[in-house]
Image (cartoon, rainbow, N blue to C red):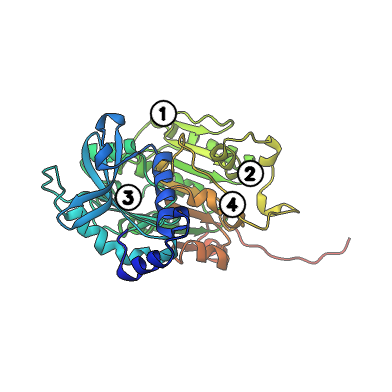
Amino acid sequence: MKPGTKRQAASAENNTAPANQNPEQLARDQIDAKLVEAGWRVQTKATLNFNAGPGIAIREYQTDQGPADYVLFVNKQAVAVIEAKPPEWGHNITTVEEQSGNYAAAKLKWINNTQPLPFIYETTGIITRFTDQRDPKPRSRELFTFHRPETLAEWLATPDSLRNRLQTLPPLDPAGLRACQINAIQNLETSFQDGRPRALIQMATGSGKTFTAITAVYRLLKHAGAKRILFLVDTRNLGEQAEQEFMSYLPNDDNRKFTELYNVQRLRSPFIAGSSQVCISTIQRMYSILKDEPLDESAEESNPAEALVRAKQPLPVVYNEKIPPEYFDFVIIDECHRSIYNLWRQVIEYFDAFLIGLTATPDNRTYGFFRKNVVSEYGHELAVADGVNVGNEVYTIQT
């Protein structure tokens, strides 16, 4: 956070104001709090103690490009830089990506780094963006907050990033799949390879949306090394149906069922097993887990979009160290045409994950949320024409 001449002049004029009124200091306080919340120990060079924990964030670290606002160390290894700006920068924070990239590539004082640091953050304390320079097409994305030190350590321990692994998915075996399902899966994987964070699958009811999603999940777990995938529904009944479909799914390349190969957990309590690779949850339960609050099970009986009384403001979500934003690699949102992503949008956007929507009847809000990245458009008329669904005829009779 480099003060310019105008900013210095402003500080001089207001030198009688309390220090905590300085917007830069307020931003620093917010950034420090978010780093501590995510498991980092914030220090200065004067107070540096690498034994304080696995993740150390050092303020104003000297480089040959000038002082970087923060340099992050994991297990005493420099891994990331943070460029900090006051809150008034807002979404203009993306304009400093070149500057933060220069710090990541700079020579750091007191250590002999020969390679650019792989991870870059820009933040105002309110908005945080992140770039993984190991990706095939590095681009920044917005985060709820900073990743945990153990997450960066785990990423560095793997030879390449998830987005790199998505580039080398093997061809899809079309056996047992309808043409509409093949098209949806192939287009979805192309969307991943292009680095697009949100994708919408629109398929008519009865054409096999859930089967399509499970096939995609299987390929992501087996071939892309996805660690954990969340399947979000808005009623308990839909969660039970999804669980049954996962249990009965038999892949083309294995004689074992999906649940014999991967651990699937339908969440019935706040507990998420560390070994679960697929979690099925209502959005109401996931919200209660993130808030660390009990859930009245009757809240899962009907979808929130049908509630007679609805909150006017989106429901707040707070950081939960047990389920950090990087906990899931992919989030699949079933029946996403419902307005769950209005009042419940923060639950979905909390996660640093690819978002995949499933619906038969999207509307303009749905297209907007998924940024018009529609990887499958298979309506009822096409399904009837293909013989996948049965049409209807109207008869008038007297009784």
Residue 221 position in % (x across, y down): 35, 40
Residue 137 showing in the rendered view: no
User: Which amino acid type is marked by label 3?
Assistant: Leu
Q: Which residue is mark 4?
A: 344
Looking at the rendered image, the quarter that the C terminus falls into is bottom right
Mark 4–mark 1 distance (CA, rounded to whole Å): 27 Å
Residue 250 position in % (x across, y down): 42, 37
Looking at the rendered image, the quarter that the N terminus falls into is bottom left
Q: Which is nearer the N-term, disc 2 or disc 4?
A: 2
Up/down of 126 relative to 41, above or below: below
Mark 1–mark 2 distance (CA, rounded to whole Å): 24 Å
User: Which amino acid type is marked by label 4?
Assistant: Trp
Using the rendered view, name the quadrant where residue 291 is placed: top right
User: Which amino acid type is marked by label 2?
Assistant: Thr
Mark 3–mark 2 distance (CA, rounded to whole Å): 31 Å
Foreground mark, 4 or 3?
4
Q: Residue at x 69, y 36 (%)?
A: 296
Using the rendered view, name the quadrant where residue 283 is placed: top right
Badge 3 local density, few (<14 within 10 Å), some, or many (20+)? few
Residue 101 position in % (x across, y down): 23, 58
